[in-house]
Structure formats: C-alpha cells, structure tokens
Amino acid sequence: MGLFDRLFGRRVTLDPASLQRLEAWRAQPESSLSDAFATTRYVVVDVETTGLDLVRDRLIAIGACAVENGQVVMADSFEIVLRQDKTSTKDNILIHGIGGEAQRDGLEPAEALLDFLDFLGKSPLVAFHVTFDETMIKRA
C-alpha cells in the first residue's frame, strides 16, 4: 500500500449508476452562507469511527439531522452504517454502540456515502468536531 493509499484510502471506481448519482449531486447549485438563517436548510452531522486517528481509523457511521427555519426537523434525518471488513474493537463498540454484526451488515461505503450526499444536497454542514468529521467523511 502506497503513502497516498495509507493517508487517503484506496480510490474507488464507481459503477455508471453511482457515477451518475455523484455527478447529479455535483451539478446541484451551491447554497450560500450569506442567505438568511431562517430560509436556509442546514444539516447537523456526526460520525462514528473505529478510533480517533485520522490516518488509520475508519468511518463506521454517519448520523445527520436537518435544521430548517431555525428548528430541528427530526423527520428530516439520516442514519447509515458503512460495511466494515474488520469490525472495531470491543472498547470502541462500547463507545458508539454499533456492534460487530451491524458493522459487517452495513451498506457498501460508496453506496452509503452517495446516500448521504442525496440527503445532504448542498446544505451547509454543522458539526462539533468539524475537522475530524470532515476528514473522516472525505477519506471514506
């Protein structure tokens, strides 16, 4: 495994349907942070990972919820587990609560991430640990 692969993970080749979904997301108009808060849909996001190492650990799950008109919209929420070839440690499972079976039965990572982009659209993201969450999502 080369340095690039260790730092950013292996590149994935998408099938034509998945590539079309990605291109459709990319073609959506960008939202502007200068738009009024009350008229903008924001997405609050959190991730679960196998640990806190940005290089070695993997993304396990993404959870997100929309905020519209300044209100959390629970009906507009998202939760997904990415399939893991190797489950996280017992101690890690105790922290995030996603067991080994759920990790092995998760969606293929590319499919899960495309589902997240579909939910997100081009809404601005809100996160507590922005750098960590963003890095783990981009690596995945």
Image: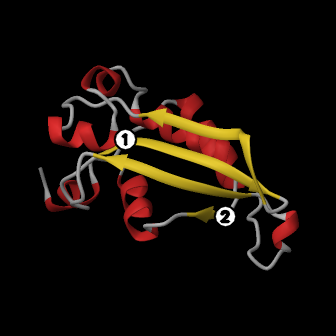
Left or right placement of residue 31 versus residue 82 in this view: right
Left or right placement of residue 57 versus residue 140 in this view: left
Give the residue at x 42% y 50%.
47
Give the residue at x 37% y 64%.
132
Neighbours of disc 2 within 10 Å: few (<14), some (14-19), many (20+): some
Q: x, y percentage for residue 76?
A: 72, 41
Residue 45 in sight in this render: yes
Question: Which residue, as the protein is rendered here, is positioned at the far bottom?
Answer: 34
User: What residue is shown with label 1?
Assistant: 12
The residue type indicated by label 1 comes to Val
> Mark 2 to mark 1: distance in Å?
25 Å
Question: Which residue occupies the foreground of this view, 27 or 138?
Answer: 138
Q: x, y percentage for residue 36?
A: 86, 74
Give the residue at x 35% y 55%.
139
Left or right placement of residue 117 versus residue 58 in this view: right
Q: Which mark is residue 87?
A: none
Give the residue at x 67% y 64%.
124
In the rendered image, the vertical position of residue 37 relative to residue 68, given as above or below: below
Quarter holding residue 109 = top left
Quarter holding residue 6 = bottom left
Question: Which residue occupies the foreground of this view, 46 or 9?
Answer: 46
Q: Could you say whether the residue bearing mark 2 is in a helix, strand or loop?
A: loop
Q: Could you say whether the residue bearing mark 1 is in a helix, strand or loop?
A: loop
Q: x, y percentage for residue 16?
A: 55, 31
Left or right placement of residue 11 versus residue 80 in this view: left
The residue type indicated by label 2 comes to Pro
User: What residue is shown with label 2?
Assistant: 124
Question: Which residue, as the protein is rendered here, is positioned at the far front?
Answer: 94
Number of labelled discs?
Answer: 2
Neighbours of disc 1 within 10 Å: few (<14), some (14-19), many (20+): few
